[in-house]
Image (cartoon, rainbow, N blue to C red):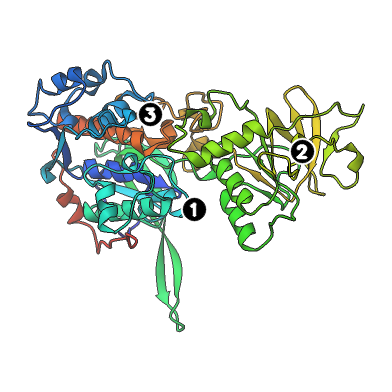
Amino acid sequence: MDLHDKEIIPGEILPVVIIAALPGNGPSGICLSYLLSGYTPYLSPEASHPNPLLHSKLGEQPHLSLLEQDLEYLCEGLEGRSSNPVAVLFDSLLLPDSDFGLDHTSPLEWRYEPEHAIPHLVLGKGPPGGAWHAMEGSMLTLSLANWMELPGLKLKDWMREKRRNVRNDRATPAEIASYYQHYVSQMSLEQSFACGTTVTSVTRQPGNQEGGPPCWRVTGLQHREGEELGDGSAVSEAVPFSMLAHNVVLATGTHDIPARLGVEGESLPYVCHSFWELEAAISRGELDQSSDPVLVVGAGLTAADAVLAAHHLNTPVYHAFRRSVTDPGLIFNQLPKLLYPEYHKVHQMMTQQQYQPSPPPQDHAQNLHDPSTPSSLPPSSSTSPSSPLSSYPGYLSFPRYRVVALRPDRKCVLESDSGQRTVVQISKALVLIGAHPNLSFLGDNGRSLGVNPNEPITCRRNPIEVDPFTNKVVAADGPGMYAMGPLVGENFVRFLKGGALAIASDLAKTLRVGGRELTTDRWVDRQTEAEVCVGDS
């Protein structure tokens, strides 16, 4: 869809704008768009739920949709792997007892009720699928395939139609991205997606003198193909837009800005902050078994993928991370070994192949793989990544170490939590310690909205603070601001759907109480030359 005018509907306020931003249009916005488009969940008359208490509660008012029911009441007594109660509720209804490996049929039935649709617009830079389009196509997703699906379209059924097999009940990011694109088309959501858009500002707009209510103003740019040149190419143009909305939903994800160490030398050209930079170096032939070791910093799944990629090339790897290998917060200690054998292998490497320092020379840091000081290399196999006696030749972990400095001569200074320093000679450094969301369209990058308003917004340490049953932003400048997905601490598609349910339910109740009868057709019919913007599946 093209946003042709600076004011999409002059004088009229759009009910809901969903800001997916960069990379944009991921599963958070897609799922919410589905619920706002008139697709409504009810308890199926023939169905039952394995949780008798929940089934009994749902049966008390079977004529009401899930959006109309008291979600807080339904959430009481439920437990699950998310701290968000509505996420646990919706997951329990979509995938009953899936944590136990059981495949119960969902007790929900979905009815298409266009008369209950709430007009909305999803703004995002990329095609539907968001960050999944940028991920390595051959890697398996962390979640089981059915945990990645959205309501109303079984992922396994879609993959079967495409004549693909789900390996180990997991799918690749490329398959997931294609599924999300197909989902938007299959559910006829295209008219609500404005691709190629970058939001630059979201501000609270006061009411006008004619009695118009306060609302939100959303401004930005939409990138479109412009005039065609003589050689057949087209000039891209950025067209500004501005719109008013009663409600805005922050659904940007957190893959926008790589987190940095904040140490000396981090901007040197051999230091990278994304897995894709490692892939580019591999494709250019810069790394092989004769290279100096690659330093991977971080203990998350992206860091593990980097270790596996380098190890596959027989490139030596140093792996530094702040946690202990036995720390229960380490993601590897939370994954079933049979379902995630590749990550279990990395955890074995981290555990069995630890650096064991010998007493360092007085007043000097110990050196590893440093041609200028070969005498400082201890003979033990546990201190050299290239030793043939190692369980995993070419790999050495540095648990509970941090990077102190990166030098122009490609030496890195590591420091243990006890204060002992070690210098390693490397070819590249990959700093893979997470990412921050891009909330530049909010004042002070949205800091005031976090649980700790003095710190930047991050998924794990400082998410946006929201009401747990409505997902309303607690510290917003006015009513009608919501947040969902990674911004509120939900990293997994399986649970971010709960945020969509909480927001759609609250919006439906708010509009019903306010007496506003809104239909999608009323808004869509007044647009000029709406153009679908959905990539090929």
Q: Upstream in the sequence, badge 3 or badge 2?
A: 2
Q: CA distance from mark 1 to mark 3?
A: 33 Å
Three-letter amino acid code at disc 3? Val
**Can you tell which mark lies on residue 405?**
2
For this orientation, the residue located farthest to the front is 389
Q: Is residue 330 visible?
A: yes
Q: Upstream in the sequence, badge 1 or badge 3?
A: 1
Closer-to-camera residue (352/7)? 352
As helix, strand or loop, the secondary structure at mark 1 comes to loop
Q: Are marks 1 and 2 in contact (CB under 8 Å)?
A: no
Which of the image's four quarters has the C terminus? bottom left
Which of the image's four quarters has the N terminus? bottom left
Q: Upstream in the sequence, badge 1 or badge 2?
A: 1
What residue would you read off at disc 3?
473
Q: CA distance from mark 1 to mark 2?
A: 30 Å
Q: Position of residue 105 (x, y in %)?
A: 19, 35
Q: Position of residue 184 (x, y in %)?
A: 27, 53
Three-letter amino acid code at disc 2? Ala
Instruction: Characterize the local packing of mark 3: few (<14), some (14-19) or many (20 or more) Cα atoms within 10 angstroms.
Output: many
Instruction: Characterize the local packing of mark 1: few (<14), some (14-19) or many (20 or more) Cα atoms within 10 angstroms.
Output: some
Counting the numbered discs, the total is 3
| Residue found at x 18% / y 19% | 52
